[in-house]
Image: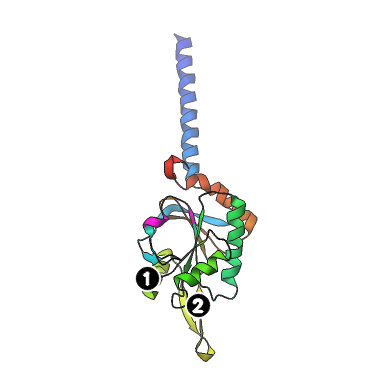
Amino acid sequence: MATRVRLLLVAAAICAAFAGFWLAHQLDRQAPELASGTWLPRARAVADFHLLDATGRPFTRADLTGAPALVFFGFTHCPDVCPTTLLKLARIRHEAALPDLRVLFVSVDPERDTPPVIGMYVHAFDPTFEGLTGDVATIRRVATNFGVAVNRVELPGGDYTMDHSAVVFLLDRQARIAAIFTPPFEVPAFVADLRRAAPYLGRGKGGAT
């Protein structure tokens, strides 16, 4: 009888240990440790929007679902931050080697960044990059939803430039903001973070993670 009780106690202890390990594992899966970015405690949904892609076709929030994406706001006349960031994102995308990872560049200067202009611009960095634009009011709403500050700055001679937040957003496969990356963007650390984050970004088409 005593032997049977001991066996039951051992079995219960093993079950409890396994349950604790499983729970810890599940909790850990919700928050990968990132070296260069911040993983949000809860993924934040992106509000629906209606923009245009580089071919002039409509692009909405639904078009973001199904694959993870890096989203960066900028403009084609940007003298330094935007081209530098896009160069790094091209390297990051290549070195991370995540087959379905998308990179989207959303213009904050739609007056100058028409679909053909933004298409030529992003494709110069990587032919897979996607450029998005739209009217001023829509761009402002999308930027606000992402938490990106945008300000038009008038320059002498009638020209202008755009001040904007230099943030890269990592979206999961449900078009939710899962993590935020801020400058400086160090390519090796960013790549390592993307690989750590990949299993936590939801299931892709056909059930693959």
Q: CA distance from mark 2 to mark 1?
A: 16 Å
Magenta residues span 62-69
Q: Position of residue 166 (x, y in %)?
A: 53, 68
The image's mark for residue 138 is 1
Give the image location of residue 142, x and y in percent: 40, 67
SS under mark 2: strand
Tell me what residue is drawn at x 47 percent, y 74 percent.
Answer: 113
Q: Position of residue 71 (x, y in %)?
A: 49, 61
Q: Looking at numbered disc 2 in the image, what kind of residue is underneath it?
A: Met
Q: Nearer the viewer, residue 61 or 201?
A: 61
Residue 23 is situated, as x and y percent measured from the top left of the image, at: 46, 36
Residue that numbered label 2 is attached to? 162
* Residue 70 seen from this side: yes
What residue lies at 53% left-to-right and 68% top-to-bottom? 120
163 vs 47: above or below: below
Q: Earlier in the sequence, mark 2 or mark 1?
A: 1
SS for dot 1:
helix
Quarter the N terminus occupies: top left
Query: Is 139 inside the magenta-drawn segment?
Result: no
> Crowding at label 2, few (<14), some or many (≥20) Cα neighbours within 10 Å?
some
